[in-house]
Image (tube, rainbow, N blue to C red):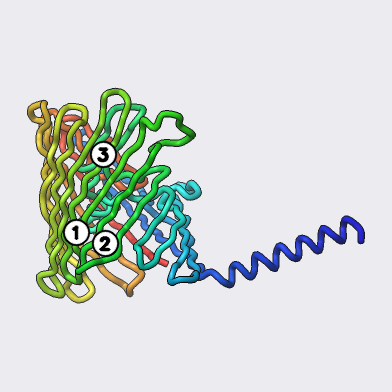
Amino acid sequence: MTSFTTGKVAAALLLATAGAAAQAADVTIYGRAHLSLDQLDNGVDSGTNVSSNASRLGFRASTKLDDGLEAFVQLEQTIRFDEGGGQFADRDSYVGLRGDFGTLKVGQFDTPLKAIRSKVDQFGDRIGDLRNLTRINTGSSNIGNVFDERFKNGVAYQSPKFNNLSWTLHYTPHNTTGATTDNVRDSYSTSLVYDVKGLYLAAAYESFEGIDGVDPKAIRLGAYYDISAQLRISALYQNASDIPGGDRDVYGAGASYKLDKFTLRGQLYQVSDNDSPDSGATLAVVGVDRNLGKDLTLYAAYGITSNDDAASYRISAGGRGTSVPAIAGENTTGLSLGIIYNF
């Protein structure tokens, strides 16, 4: 047999094996196209922008194993519908195993602390996203932003539910790229969640080990309660410590009300002063959704972040492709018309 023929046989065997594996796994392709037309104002200048907001394309696969186990994998990446481009596997991407013992996964993905905000935020990935206040820029090139981030090189365990309670521990030995010989960037996040239809209560603690004498920590409490089939109220509290400038608290509440095919929503949150006076801000946002089937939503929202004299918080940061920097002491505002298509 010639080497050419041998190569063809090997290639055929490889394709056959890959085909069998693909048939054995349950593979799903999914995504979201979320774009908005925004009028953004930083108190001095304003402009009209198109923004792609956490738009994504993802792949999931799972395979049933012996002894009631299941293996699973996810690859998810940002898609910039507004400007083109994206980065492969830059969002939640992991491999894992689940069974009666709970769920274990390894990769890069949201922390338990971040998951709480995602559950209670009335304007996630939109104008007025709570990350405008809860995410902290440490000013350190070794750490960067903290809270509402993904851990790199993460290992996480989530327990099974017991009486609607579950516990999650998420650890990373090296929360940055490349290799390490000293593990000075290890970090962890843990949460306890009570989740039953119509009621969600959660508490989380997160800690980063930095090197520049900065070791950010946060406690976060979140909740929502469905008073009726139409009305949901939500709330969040966060205390951040060991951060530049001194400790800060974020607290507030929101609500949504379903009216036929429309959903009215709003939220009001406050971030406190740190060691500097007049460094706090208030975020307020209102909006309305129009649902056109289960996969398509049109919405309008208006938000304002009222900054104290020494504060510079945005209205358009967090989960968005386009954001206008804030100016200290100036209010930032945004009017947004958006479309969300899930597929």
The residue beneath circle 2 is 299
Q: Residue at x 34, y 54 (%)?
A: 157
| Residue 81 in view | no
Position of 333 relative to 157 (above/below): above
Q: Residue at x 13, y 69 (%)?
A: 226
User: Secondary structure under badge 1?
Assistant: strand
| Image quadrant occupied by the N terminus | bottom right
- Label 3, on which residue? 207
Q: Is residue 204 left or right of residue 154?
A: left
Q: Residue furthest right?
A: 1
Label 1, on which residue? 287
Label 2 vs label 3: CA separation?
36 Å
Q: Kindly report the distance in space between the C-alpha atoms of the residues bearing marks 1 and 2.
A: 7 Å
User: Along the polypeptide, which appears first: circle 2 or circle 3?
Assistant: 3
Mark 1 or mark 3: which comes first in sequence?
Answer: 3
Q: Which mark is residue 268?
A: none
Q: Residue at x 49, y 71 (%)?
A: 66
Q: Amino acid at mark 1?
A: Gly
How far apart are the two marked residues, 1 and 3, measured between alpha carbons?
Answer: 34 Å
Of labels 2 and 3, the one closer to you: 3
- Cβ–Cβ under 8 Å for marks 1 and 2: yes
